[in-house]
Amino acid sequence: MRHPNPIGLLTTTAGGPVEIRDVNLLNTNLFSSTYFFDLFSHLTAERIPQRVVHGKGIAARGYFEVTNDVSKYTKADVFNGIGKKTPLLSRFSPAIQERGGTDVGREFRGFAIKFFTNEGNLDILNLHVPVFTVRQPVHFAMLVHTLNIRNPKTNLFNFEQQWDFIISRPTVYHVFLYLLSDFGIPDGYRKTDYFADHTFELNNKDGDRYFAKFNFRTEQGGAFLTSAEAADIQATDLDYFARDLYNAIAENNYPSWRLEMDVMSLHDIKHVNFDPFDVTRLWENGTYHTVNVGRVVLNEMPENQFRDSEQAIYNLNNLVPGIPGPVDVVYQSRQISYSDAHNYRVGHNNENIEVNRPKYSKTYDRDGVPPVRNNMKDAPTYYPNSFNGPIPYVDESKPLERIVLLQSNAVDLQHPADFYNIVLGTDAAKQRLADNIVTTLQQVKSPVILKRVLRLLYLTDADLGERVETSYNLASSCRV
């Protein structure tokens, strides 16, 4: 932050020079000080609404470089042309923490990426776990309330309400096993994979359809923290993840991720024996193949985090030709709710904010709360028109058929069971999961909720239920 010389004269917000006695204000007429009124009126208004989720975050800039030919699957310009580099803005964040919270809590980590492509902005939002939280849109708001809305009476967070929601909506159960396992606390933002979770529709220049899951694989090597290690770090450094990311880039140790696509053809996706659009489960081995696309490299920290992190918006409507996007109802609901959140936080002209501006933009949107840029000057304000306003293009390779999904409410505990027995694998990892579950259950006061949680764990796998029940009884006896 230090500069070798003063960077210029201090001014009022209108650009008028500030005389040194106006900074002091002793023995002066307070009501004549423009500087004073500028300073304090701005002080009371310099916070914008915090994000409801992912409130704490840190931005980093970089680029995406294409390393493999994937033109067979998508005509998207950003993913085609080996060696092509596209600038990007990313934002890392814990999902539940408020501003000023801890980086090392046991929860979701987000990695949002905005690609500034030649065909408009492409925004891909990722989590560090490969399954999403809900598969019914109405459940999302309720889940958020259980996770980051404090008890109205005690003003404390409450694990009892979280477990109550899980046993009432077991489709969210799978993702919580990830969080309560070794995967729950990565050792920093750099040392973990990230997943877009949804199944994205793609099309190539011939109109052929494919379906893909985007996975960002860390090139730093994966590493995770135990609960004890996280507690030790939290005692001295609430910003451990942010500090690690900043230092790595400052030391030119640029973090990078390899972008992979798990791909199915239109034929494949119609003949699998599971719902490939269900965001709460994994695709089954042998039903897809994986292709490399390119690398994300982060090589610059912003000079101003408010500008690039707080004002940044990541809009799931921001897709590009060749990537029409997911067709599941959860993604569609996120497209609506995220846009509404951005409009509330930073105004309807949020795409005009410098950090969000695409390379090219011509619209019929006008006026409103600044910034409005050149407000499209004197171009027509309506379409169609006879005055050569911007016109739409014809995408001849866009598939004509529309995919309609019919989804079920059925709960399938096979996926949590596979996670427990296959993904975790070792006895040590299983026991750590059980111990972490017990830590949350110690806050559950209702015998009915506790009984239903244990039943859900036993139904998943008898060994999991036994481990948790044994550990819980031992912890309860020690407390007595």
Image (cartoon, rainbow, N blue to C red):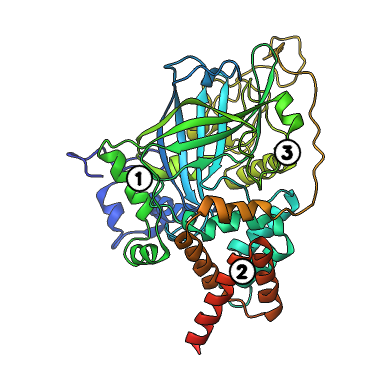
Q: Secondary structure at mark 1?
A: helix
Give the residue furthest to the left.
Answer: 4
Q: Which mark is residue 465?
A: 2
Q: Quadrant of the N terminus?
A: top left
Q: Secondary structure at mark 3?
A: loop
Tell me the residue that label 1 is attached to: 245
> Can residue 442 be seen in the rendering of this structure?
no
User: Spatial distance from mark 3 to mark 1, Cα to Cα?
Assistant: 34 Å
Please state the horizontal and vertical placement of residue 186, each as a whole percent of the image: 43, 52
The three-letter amino acid code for the residue at tag 1 is Leu
Image: 477 above or below 177 = below
Verify CB contact (< 8 Å) between mark 3 and mark 1: no
User: Spatial distance from mark 2 to mark 1, Cα to Cα?
Assistant: 38 Å
Tell me the residue that label 3 is attached to: 328
The three-letter amino acid code for the residue at tag 2 is Gly
Query: Is label 2 or label 1 in front?
Result: 2
Near mark 2 (Cα within 10 A), the count class, few <14, some 14-19 or many ≥20, is: some
Image: 174 above or below 80 = below
Query: Is label 3 or label 1 in front?
Result: 3
The three-letter amino acid code for the residue at tag 3 is Asp
Please state the horizontal and vertical placement of residue 200, each as a whole percent of the image: 65, 31
